[in-house]
């Protein structure tokens, strides 16, 4: 049985890897819920009726798509092209972000990210700016208007090795990037490359992470790090 990457995003801010939405916004019967799933080993994005579990449409993609985020309007989904099955897999991987029109249930564009490859971690902020992480190049890419961008509009180094995933603040001003091979977490400023990343070593093989709100609805700190701790606070 192949692994399917699933994300529940109905009524919440965009998360990473899949979503549920009402069918009225995805081309199905009004009022029914549709689950959108990245099928990593099926090389596709599937649209499933939640009540019946039936597949209503499958959008074919190049081999091994991985993570996905969705914009605030639930109009577009953005899927990173990792291009290999697992992080331990050898190969150059993919160098693209696929743009899925959720209303039309189709692949409408492909954003070329070359020379940045093995695109894995994905994020989107409260202004619908998109972020994609190149594992091979350890670079965090930014797309200011991803619905129309043909290429990244910015890029900052993450200062890790095999940078796989990241947690993003709501305003997109901070990203916490995990490095599988360097065993690091890097605090990166996606919109200010003049600020050097702040790097810590939390333990072996750091991977997924999240941010915990500590000082109000629009302020986030890394989970498990007290607000007064300087360990992951940047100037």
Image (tube, rainbow, N blue to C red):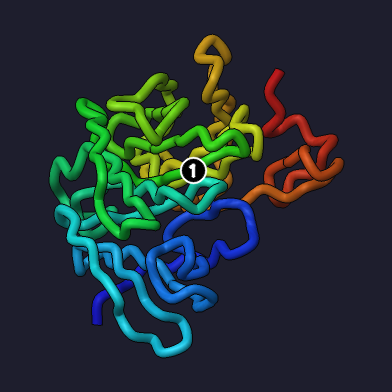
What residue do we see at 58% from left, 40% from top? 168
Q: Is residue 86 left or right of residue 70?
A: left
Q: Is residue 159 visible?
A: no
Within-10-Å neighbours for mark 1: few <14, some 14–19, many 20+: many
Instruction: Give how far across and how far down residue 99 sits, in percent.
Output: 32, 45
Q: What is the quadrant of residue 95 in the picture?
A: top left
What residue do we see at 43% from left, 41% from top? 179
In the image, farthest residue toward the front: 30
Q: How many numbered marks have been drawn onto this rendered protein structure?
A: 1
Instruction: Give how far across and how far down residue 43 sits, in percent.
Output: 19, 62
Secondary structure under tag 1 reads strand
What residue do we see at 35% from left, 25% from top? 152
The residue closer to the viewer here, 137 or 80, is 80
Q: What is the quadrant of residue 155 in the picture?
A: top left
The residue closer to the viewer here, 109 or 87, is 109
Position of residue 173 relative to residue 51, above or below, is above
Q: Is residue 86 left or right of residue 11?
A: left
Q: Find disc 1 in the rendering and name its residue.
A: 123
């Amino acid at each position: 049985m192949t692994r399917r990457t699933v994300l529940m995003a109905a009524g919440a801010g965009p998360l990473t890897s899949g979503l549920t939405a009402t069918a009225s916004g995805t081309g199905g019967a009004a009022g029914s819920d549709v689950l959108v799933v990245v099928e990593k080993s099926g090389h596709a994005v599937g649209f499933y009726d939640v009540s019946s579990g039936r597949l209503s449409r499958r959008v074919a993609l190049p081999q091994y798509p991985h993570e996905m985020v969705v914009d605030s309007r639930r109009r577009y989904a953005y899927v990173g092209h990792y291009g290999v099955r697992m992080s331990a897999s050898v190969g150059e991987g993919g160098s693209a972000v696929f743009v899925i029109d959720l209303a039309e249930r189709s692949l409408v564009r492909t954003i070329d990210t070359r020379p940045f490859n093995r695109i894995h971690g994905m994020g989107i902020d409260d202004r619908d700016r998109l972020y994609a992480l190149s594992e091979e190049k350890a670079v965090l890419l930014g797309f200011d208007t991803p619905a129309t961008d043909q290429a990244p509009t910015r890029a900052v180094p993450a200062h890790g090795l095999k940078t796989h995933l990241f947690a993003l603040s709501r305003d997109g001003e901070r990203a916490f990037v995990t490095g599988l091979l360097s065993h690091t977490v890097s605090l990166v400023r996606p919109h200010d490359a003049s600020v050097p990343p702040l790097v810590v070593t939390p333990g072996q093989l750091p991977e997924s992470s999240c941010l915990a709100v500590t000082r109000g609805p629009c302020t986030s700190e890394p989970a498990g790090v007290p607000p007064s701790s300087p360990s992951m606070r940047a100037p």
